[in-house]
Image (cartoon, rainbow, N blue to C red):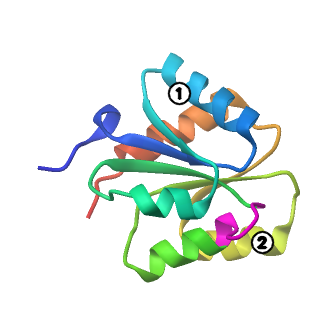
Amino acid sequence: MTATGKDQFVCVVDDDEAVRDSTQMLLDVYGFKARTYPGAYEFLAEFDAARTGCLILDIHMPEMTGVELLSLLRARGVDTPAIVVSGQNDPVLGEVLTRSGALAILNKPVNEDELMRFVEQALAIPSS
């Protein structure tokens, strides 16, 4: 049986520890289960598609960017909804992410209410 909604984890992948900690605290306040990772490889080592309902990915990370991570997951057939955050507004990158199936692309600093609306929307999407 697959977990649904608030039973699933929101996985936050961001190389900035302060961002990971604050995002996890925000998710906790809203009653979501969260797991945080400092990079794509740490995330991939523990990734469980059946227990992950939503991804929050930073675009600019060393070793593997959020774009590369999302592309890799999509190539593997993983359709987990992803919210991508970036410190830069880049329309070309936004188009690439949209084609990769990003649910939303948010600019830092992220509006907390907007982020939580997208997390709730992502967790409402039935997994395939």
In this rendering, the answer to whether 51 lies above or below 27 is below
Q: Which quadrant does the C terminus fall into?
A: bottom left
- Report the predominant secondary structure element of the magenta stretch: loop
Element assignment for label 2: helix
> Marks 2 and 1, Cα distance to the nearest angstrom?
26 Å
Q: Residue furthest top?
A: 29
| Residue at (65, 30) in percent of width and height | 21
Between disc 2 and disc 1, the foreground one is 1
Residue placed most toward the observer, 123 or 75: 75
Question: Percent from the top left, x then y, of residue 119?
Answer: 51, 40
Question: Percent from the top left, x then y, of residue 71?
Answer: 56, 77
Which disc number belongs to residue 115? Answer: none
- Counting residues from the start of the chain, the first of labels 2 and 1 encountered is 1
Q: Amino acid at mark 1?
A: Leu
Q: What residue sits right under mark 2 in the picture?
A: 93
Q: Residue furthest bottom?
A: 75
Q: What residue sits right under mark 1 in the picture?
A: 27
Circle 2: is it few (<14), some (14-19), or many (20+) Cα within 10 Å?
some
Magenta stretch contains residue 119: no
